Image (tube, coloured by chain):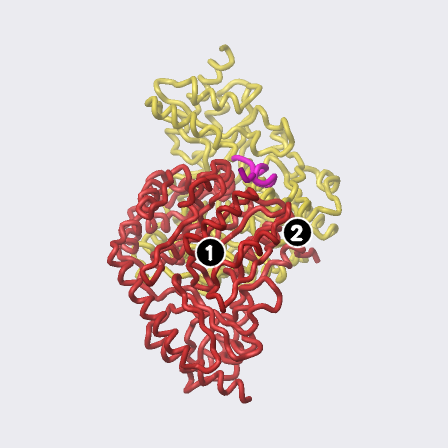
Chain colours: A yellow, B red
């Protein structure tokens, strides 16, 4: 029988995926499962985007331009300009989601055995895109005690070798919800310049910034033009994760030309989703105001409720819609599975993402979970109630 | 300035892409360009698929399952069964186009430096997917004299090393239009079994088979269950290239599990396109009958007209909608560019794909072009008229 490759065997499983069969079994037994495990918001997609697809008048669903149409990229330029990011249409390659943007970017700048530094905990699929490109992730650990702030820059410097090609950050962060300060971005920029590394910022949660704070993009750094790469996506911004439209943005012309070659090989981003994404750029500000208000209320509710649980540690996110909680358990993987497999409270239980999957350093985050606050307040209150009782029973069993 | 990787630099450009600026310049000068260069059919997408998107009632454009919904895969099973391909939903991973199906499949079965054997001329983007996976293509040349039939199996055997992981065929073929016979598929199957290689068949043109011939899939080969991998796509079948839905099909459970890990890393295929693709499976047979009739007429018209040109050699395709023509020129790349840059006939010219880009062996196919017969008969007649006169002027200049 022909064999899967070593690389294929090394492709990581999603940290949530192994829990899915247990959640399905629970549902089959009639148990309601509150999904705190996924980044799929329950927020409605903007009308203007939905309507654009309903009103489309295509007769032939033809290939789009590999890099996205001139019109869409010009409209993206206006959007970025409104965020004080000064780019032109030629600095943008439209991709099939942020996922493809990351896959192509890493492919464009690394060779077999190269290394990328990422502060952990980090978005688990960075593992997949790195493995697919035969790249090793060198983690720099951030801690819940510091609210997952940027680790000391010397810790990054220690990880740099002659194989290091880039630093990747997610800002605001999945799974931490941490928003990097201007000062932290500047420190990273200086480091990238000093060692001639790419600084890749996954900024797909740009809009989701709370408490009057402002988002500082890597694209705002003077002198970093050839080093900064912005990864973006419509998925979270417009609650249209299934559209699969993202982009790579950079002023480094070689990088953009190389990403474009990847884009040409796969021919076209999805045409219907491009229609929706172009229309979505006309979403009124009130939509975002409402969504932000909703998320802030959810976050505050969630934290308030979580803090009622004894011995729990919670980091207050300043952006995105995730938080990391440290639980009074030894093995959050086992606890999460147990909640689905062996526990319910009046036929209700919860599904969370064990945080170990977001760490690259073995053994880290073993007692942590990621909670996505993508449910309404009532559901969040009930979910934390379930969590609290589950922890009690689990501890004493 | 940070550098693009060797791999990034090695990513090939589309063989057509370098001609695009010349085509754009011609259009700016008011010259009408007949596009014989692309695989974008002018055939209408089935109503049932278009309507499904117009009538969609999504409120949230959410992630789809990474492998595609149970419902869609079950419907695909029925489609495959109707083609005498015996598979189950668990043998299918839905992908973002055939492109992603190929990228993930090659990634799943190869490591850095492995090799894949492909009869040439072949679909140029196999180069991109191989380069992205650090894989070397070992070509086996097929010739216009033999109508691009399968080269002698001993020529494949000569290319096999301990790094060979797979053979890829496109059936019916882009760019040749060649349809492999049952006997040829059996020969390849025997070779794959003998050397324990995967046999990957890109069968996206399955429906486009002419002259009463029947398509023989690698999935029909007994005993090849663990070796056969089918790459598929809705792009050409339903003239919806921009949808970006394809799939990997195999009875090899390890292969499917590994492709699924790739699919999970990128989260979801595009949701709107999934709606269209599921609906497209209800396209009535009359649609295909009409399309096939149209393509056969176009092919016959095209060949008849081409044969009026002196010293031209044309291979008659039995499937797909491409053919390779050998021209009385030394350098078809130059000729194709010249037709756009320096020639027009009453303000009309044509764009063709130089065939050199479809060969891996340097210097091969230099005097060949690929013509896609994706235009109506009147346009094809006029386009060949232009080609004939262009050749005359080019020869004598």
Task: Reply above or below: A334 against A286.
Answer: above
Residue at point 59%, 37% (across, down): A10
Chain letter for mark 2: A
**A282 and A193: which is toward the camera:** A193
The answer to whether the residue labelled 2 contacts the one labelled 1, judged by CB atoms less than 8 Å apart, is no
Tag 1 residue: B170
**Front residue of this view, candidates B46 and A194:** B46
Label 2 and label 1: CA atoms lie apart by 38 Å
Along the viewing direction, whichever of A210 and B68 lies nearer the viewer: B68
Provide the residue span drawn in magenta. Answer: A1-13
- Picture coordinates of residue A134, whole percent (x, y): 63, 44
Can residue A211 be seen here? Answer: no
Task: Find residue A198 and name its label.
Answer: 2
Residue A4 in magenta stretch: yes
Residue at x-position 30% and y-position 46%:
B82
Dot 2: element: strand
């Amino acid at each position: 029988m022909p064999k899967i490759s070593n690389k294929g065997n090394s492709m990581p499983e999603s940290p949530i995926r192994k829990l899915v069969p247990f959640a399905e079994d629970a549902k089959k037994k009639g148990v309601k499962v509150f999904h705190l495990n996924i980044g799929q918001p329950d927020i409605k997609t903007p009308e203007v985007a939905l309507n654009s697809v309903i009103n489309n008048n295509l007769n032939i669903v033809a290939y789009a331009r590999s890099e996205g149409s001139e019109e869409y990229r010009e409209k993206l330029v206006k959007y970025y300009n409104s965020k004080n990011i000064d780019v032109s249409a030629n600095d943008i390659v439209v991709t099939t989601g942020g996922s493809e943007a990351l896959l192509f970017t890493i492919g464009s700048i690394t060779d077999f055995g190269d290394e990328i530094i990422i502060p952990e905990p980090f978005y688990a699929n960075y593992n997949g895109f790195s493995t697919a490109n035969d790249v090793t992730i060198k983690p720099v650990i951030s801690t819940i005690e510091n609210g997952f702030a940027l680790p000391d820059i010397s810790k990054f410097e220690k990880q740099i070798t002659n194989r290091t090609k880039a630093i990747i950050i997610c800002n605001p962060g999945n799974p931490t919800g941490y928003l990097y300060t201007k000062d932290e971005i500047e420190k990273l920029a200086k480091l990238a310049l000093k060692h001639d590394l790419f600084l890749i910022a996954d900024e797909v949660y740009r809009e989701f910034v709370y408490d009057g704070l402002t988002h500082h993009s890597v694209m705002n750094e003077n002198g970093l033009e050839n080093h900064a790469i912005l990864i973006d996506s419509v998925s979270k911004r417009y609650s249209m994760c299934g559209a699969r439209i993202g982009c790579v943005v950079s002023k480094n012309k070689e990088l953009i030309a190389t990403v474009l070659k990847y884009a040409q090989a796969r021919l076209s981003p999805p045409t219907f989703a491009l229609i929706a994404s172009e229309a979505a750029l006309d979403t009124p500000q009130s939509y975002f105001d409402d969504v932000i208000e909703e998320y802030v209320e959810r976050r505050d509710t969630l934290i308030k409720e979580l803090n009622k649980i004894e011995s729990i540690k919670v980091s207050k996110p300043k952006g995105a819609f995730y938080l990391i909680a440290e639980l009074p358990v030894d093995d959050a993987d086992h606890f999460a599975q147990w909640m689905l497999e062996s526990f319910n409270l009046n036929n209700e239980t919860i599904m969370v993402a064990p945080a170990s999957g977001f760490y690259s350093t073995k053994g880290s985050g073993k007692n942590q979970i990621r909670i996505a606050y993508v449910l309404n307040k009532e559901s969040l209150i009930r979910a934390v109630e379930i969590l609290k009782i589950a922890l009690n029973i689990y501890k004493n069993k």
